[in-house]
Amino acid sequence: MLMNDGHEVEMTVFHRKITGRQRSDDPQEVEISSTISLPAPPGVVRIFTINLKRLYEIKEPGAYTLEVSLFDKSSKAIVHSNNLTLAVGSQ
């Protein structure tokens, strides 16, 4: 979840589609990527690249807070990352 000033940043159509949060005004045809399962034993660190511009409508400069979560099949729990603070400058 990406937050700015205490509010969740608006999701892109793509992000709403892959998370099941589509709106009635969203186009029906949206290209989505496949998912990849990468099991790892406890203590192993995985590094992923996330294109935030594909997921969120980042329109203003400022300080953003990002928390990433995923479902861990082995523990059957949602695992949350530490919060990251991102500084977005004006172009």
Image: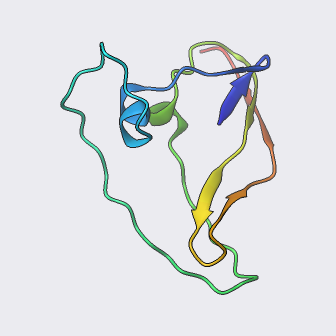
Residue 68 rendering spot, x and y as whole percentages: 66, 48
Which is more toward the observer, 71 or 10? Answer: 71
Vertical placement of 90 versus 39: above or below? above
Residue 5 rendering spot, x and y as whole percentages: 79, 16
**Which residue is located at x 61 percent, y 78 percent?**
74
Residue 31 rendering spot, x and y as whole percentages: 24, 40
- The furthest residue to the bottom: 41
Which is more toward the observer, 87 or 34? Answer: 34
Which is more toward the observer, 68 or 78? Answer: 78
State which quadrant residue 75 falls in.
bottom right
**Which residue is located at x 20 percent, y 27 percent?**
28
Q: Where does the C terminus fall, quadrant-wise? A: top right
In the displayed structure, does residue 81 sit left or right of residue 52?
right
- The furthest residue to the front: 76
In the displayed structure, does residue 28 sit left or right of residue 90?
left
Q: Where does the N terminus fall, quadrant-wise? A: top right
Vertical placement of 55 versus 74: above or below? above
**Which residue is located at x 37 percent, y 19 percent?**
23
Which is more toward the observer, 77 or 86? Answer: 77
Vertical placement of 90 versus 37: above or below? above
State which quadrant residue 34 falls in.
bottom left
State which quadrant residue 29 falls in.
top left
- The furthest residue to the left: 29
**Which residue is located at x 75 percent, y 54 percent?**
81
Looking at the picture, the colour scheme in use is rainbow
In the displayed structure, does residue 50 sit left or right of residue 77?
left
